[in-house]
Image (tube, coloured by chain):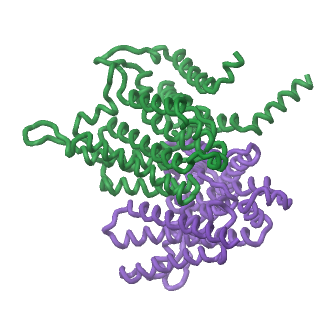
Chain colours: A purple, B green
Amino acid sequence: MKHPLLPLGITIGLFVAMAAFGGVRYQGFLSLQVFLNLLIDNAFLCVVAVGMTFVILSGGIDLSVGAVIALTTMISAALLQAGWNAWAVMLAVLAIGAAFGALQGFLIQRFGLAPFIVTLAGMFLARGCCYLISTESIPITDATYTAIAQARIPAGLDASLTVGAAIAIVIVLAGMRIAHATEFGRTVYAIGGGESAARLMGLPVAATRVRVYLLSGFTAALAGIVMTFYMLSGYSLHAVGLELDAIAAVVIGGTLLAGGVGYVAGTLFGVLILGIIQTLIAFDGTLSSWWTRIVVGVLLLLFCLLQRLFEARSRRTA
Amino acid sequence: MKRLAQHALFWPSATLALLLLVNGVLNPSFLAISWRDGHLFGNLIDILNRAAPLMIVSLGMTLVIAIRGLDISVGAVVAIAAAVAALLVGGGFSADGAVASRYPLWFALGAALMVAMICGLWNGLLVVKAGMQPIVATLILMVAGRGVAQLLTGGQIITVYYPPYYVLGSGFLLGLPVALWIAALLWLVLQLLATRTGLGLFIRAIGGNPEAARVAGVRAADIALCVYTFCGLAAGVAGLIISSNVKSADANSAGQLLELDAILAVVLGGTALTGGRFSLAGTVLGALIIQTLTATIYSLGVPPEVNLVVKAVLVFAVMLLQSAEFRALVLRTVRARAGAA
């Protein structure tokens, strides 16, 4: 690929174009709060998509994240109901999410299983565990959780952010740093680029692969916490199909599904594009919600075709 | 005995037999079959009827997986086919008081199946011509397809008021469910194609080594297109049966998670996810295992929520058994124990 930043540029350009379109068409669209709301309403998607970016960069896939988010909300709600301390609950669910991801990573690495099928079984398992806890929605009334849910961080111009959105921003920044300035990040890119080459270079392929899924499980649990702030309830049907949205955000963000090429910053814009599609449809008011799915599908198609085009061209110039 | 255990269908058959045995012991009436209202009646018949759509989808999925592909859009295609059929059949009372469909039934069914085949062909084109990874290519239709189905139905559940349409999903022929006949016919045709023509060999060749197959003169691209199109068609047939069974089309929930059950059925039946080795009969057994498992969970009075956990454990177990590394590890452990003793 001649310009490695080109796909990222296209993604950002698309986002700007959609924002401009909304600004011209609908009154009140171009306000800071509308844009911050993109982040507020999609904070959990943003957090989980950062973890997914690493998985896809390494050439794998994680289908269990939506179910892990639901399980996190369920465990949080159940533990809070049992009278646990709020901070202890958060630590516990983060540890459970990371352990769940690490276990999947271990199965994939140690026994050479397909990531797709392992995380699929993980998805069944996590959703099933949700139902075991309760089939009903459990409300959260804990004082710390409600205080965090209602807290607003002023962002200037009368606009504000939620704690969840702030967490999302921190995770994106941390993700960028991990991807580009650590040994772990470079190893992830190397595995995605070519596993045997990475192994021959003496990189810790096995440990890194397990850690990639651990990271994905951790971000899924963190996204689950952000979702409990947003919803103030635990429910086994939270985040159904969210793994698809996360994968779509990563792909639209310019990361190659074959692995090895992509940016965490691109994923942020992928999430924002998914968000702005929903906002545009909401502002329009006449389009039904299922148009979101169709538009996301079309965007996925365009970006995948674009990726193929880039790959074909880079092969010719190589 | 040893040769029996090595037969490809041994493990799926044994699993199914064990499940039925457990049911029979815990609840002897489970296995009872009687003749009622002019057809066979009983839990087993119910399982066969309910497993039929899954069998049909899984047969299509078997061929796709055999050529190293994957189709995760089958659930969405089920929803689309069901929506098209329900809209075209519609139904209601005409002026003279007789029930009538909006369009002739053959036209509605044909159109629904045609749309389903186009969906499959679309997947095939993305994989073969555009060179996308199968999981990504079919992800696009999985995301957009349900949106399209909702667009067709306007987000409503479309009810069908035309009894002839109900035959597919709840009718009986010669005492057995019509849906089962359809599944059996499809299996028979595929089995004949796979064993009596070169198709089975070609599919194994493509799955074993796509490049070698192409060099050897197998028209890999054409066969892959046909396989994906067939998978779409199979999903369409299942969509018709499912919507006929519930007498309506629900774009939001029809075929939800069906792709996962289908992949599970294929894997349980002994088809390798790495391609090249497939068993159509195994897949049929796999679908029956899944449906029997569901029925068992209901009949044992265990909360149905456990179903997902049981399925997950099953997938983990089958997956590990299929892994060469895992078998080697077990073998080493057993030998080490034997050596120490």
Q: Quadrant of the C terminus of chain B?
A: top right
Nearest the camera: B288 or A31? B288
* Residue A115 visible at all: no
Seen as rendered, the residue at the extreme front is: B217
Residue occupying the far left of the picture: B96
Asked where in the image residue A186 lies, by quadrant, the reply is bottom right
Residue A280 appears in the figure: yes
A92 to the left or right of B220: right
Picture coordinates of residue A208, whole percent (x, y): 77, 57
Q: In this view, does A193 lie above or below B171?
A: below
Please state which of residues A138 and B148 is positioned toward the viewer in this rendering: B148
Residue A46, x across and y down, in percent: 58, 66
User: Where B18 sits versus A90, above or below?
Assistant: above
Farthest residue in the bottom direction? A157
* Number of numbered discs: 0
Snapshot quadrant of residue A248: bottom right
Residue A233 image position (x, y, % from top left): 51, 54
Furthest residue toward right? B340
Q: Residue drawn at (77%, 39%), measured in percent from left and top?
A: B325
Residue at screen point 37% across, 38% down: B242
Residue B2 vs residue B251: left or right?
A: right
User: Depth check: A61 or A102 in front?
Assistant: A61
Q: Nearer the viewer, residue A214 or B334?
A: B334
Residue at point 32% right, 23% down? B173
In this rendering, the answer to whether A26 lies above or below A113 is below
Specify the quadrant that holds the N terminus of chain B. top right
Instruction: Return the x and y of residue B258 as percentages of the image width and height.
Output: 48, 42
